[in-house]
Image (spheres, rainbow, N blue to C red):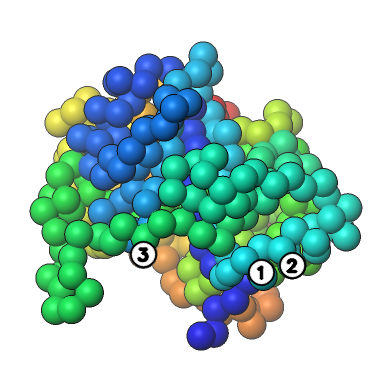
Amino acid sequence: MAMTGVLRPGHAQVRVLNLEEAVKFYRDVLGLVETGCDAQGRVYFKCWDERDHNSYVIREADRAGIDFFAFKVLDKATLDKLDADLQVYGIKTERIPAGEMLETGERVRFELPSGHVMELYAEKTVIGNGLPIVNPAPWTRQREHGIGPVRLDHALLYGPNVAEVQKIFTEVLGFYLVERVLTPDGENNAAIWLSCSHKVHDIAFAEYPEKGKLHHCSFLMESWEQVLRAGDIMSMNKVAVDIGPTRHGVTRGCTIYAWDPSGNRFETFMGGYQPYPDNTEPLTWTFDNFGQGLDYPQRKLHETFLTVVS
Ligand SMILES: [Fe+2]
């Protein structure tokens, strides 16, 4: 197996204003699979083709936003090593015991200089995707319920100290920089796209004065046609759409941004190229071309992209 260390995004916990309304939205409009609820009142979901028990967890609160975003690591030894590496680097870590989240093993929690809470974990119960391991069909009926994304793909988070965040991801956690947008003076990075894999991004950050903000969690669709179908379902259900369907210049991904009923932005996304970690020259966008980076056909830096977060 070539992949080691941090494998991929694992779960996000997001706050919603009305749990009942949010459950209906995520289950029946976005088409996630509801897999449980816990004593704290959190409701757990996964995408239809994900095999682990959960990837998206919601809880009711008086303000929207993200509680934490987690990455799955290869195994327990990797978890212990990354915990030690973070501490050596000077980052305080905390152990959350196994079972605090449903069907999830021990987690290592730490806060980034951007104010975002990150977690690493190695174990989550495999419940499968509803298909047999032997002679499986290519999809299940769950894919046809609502938008039906394949997996939780990545998140874009807004906060301060993006340069320090980049160092932690690249020097401690084994990520590499795939793309960036420069600040208007060209001296620093205004936004960064980081990968721990062969994906064009596993997480992204943009410089923003307020700490700990969520720009969007992104859900992967299998095709451009599925992204357009997602747009149809959004309109049928009067979902507030932000941008798209369109294509990003950054990552070359095809996208729709929209908001859940609480004002948390989410993305239905497909495509993008496949970089390798020996990609030593990140693609760079100057700030005056950020509009093309965001919305390549319209070359438009939508105001909401820069200013609306939860
Ligand atoms: Fe995205």
Q: Residue at x 80, y 63 (%)?
A: 85
Q: Residue at x 36, y 29 (%)?
A: 260
Q: Is residue 64 left or right of residue 151?
A: right
Q: Quadrant of the C terminus?
A: top right
- From the image, tell me which residue sits under label 1: 78
> Quadrant location of residue 170?
bottom right
- From the image, tell me which residue sits under label 3: 271
The amino acid pointed to by label 3 is: Gly
- Residue 185 or residue 234, whichever sits in front: 234
Q: For mark 2, does the 10 Å Cα neighbourhood hold few (<14), some (14 to 19), or many (20 or more) residues?
A: few
Q: Is residue 237 left or right of residue 115?
A: left
Residues under numbered marks 1 and 2 in contact, where contact means CB atoms less than 8 Å apart: yes
| Residue 254 in sight from this viewpoint | no
Q: Residue at x 48, y 33 (%)?
A: 14
Q: Position of residue 106 (x, y in %)?
A: 60, 52
- Give the CA distance from mark 1 to mark 2: 5 Å
The amino acid pointed to by label 2 is: Lys
Residues under numbered marks 2 and 3 in contact, where contact means CB atoms less than 8 Å apart: no
Q: Which mark is residue 81?
A: 2
Helix, strand or loop status at disc 1: helix
The amino acid pointed to by label 1 is: Thr
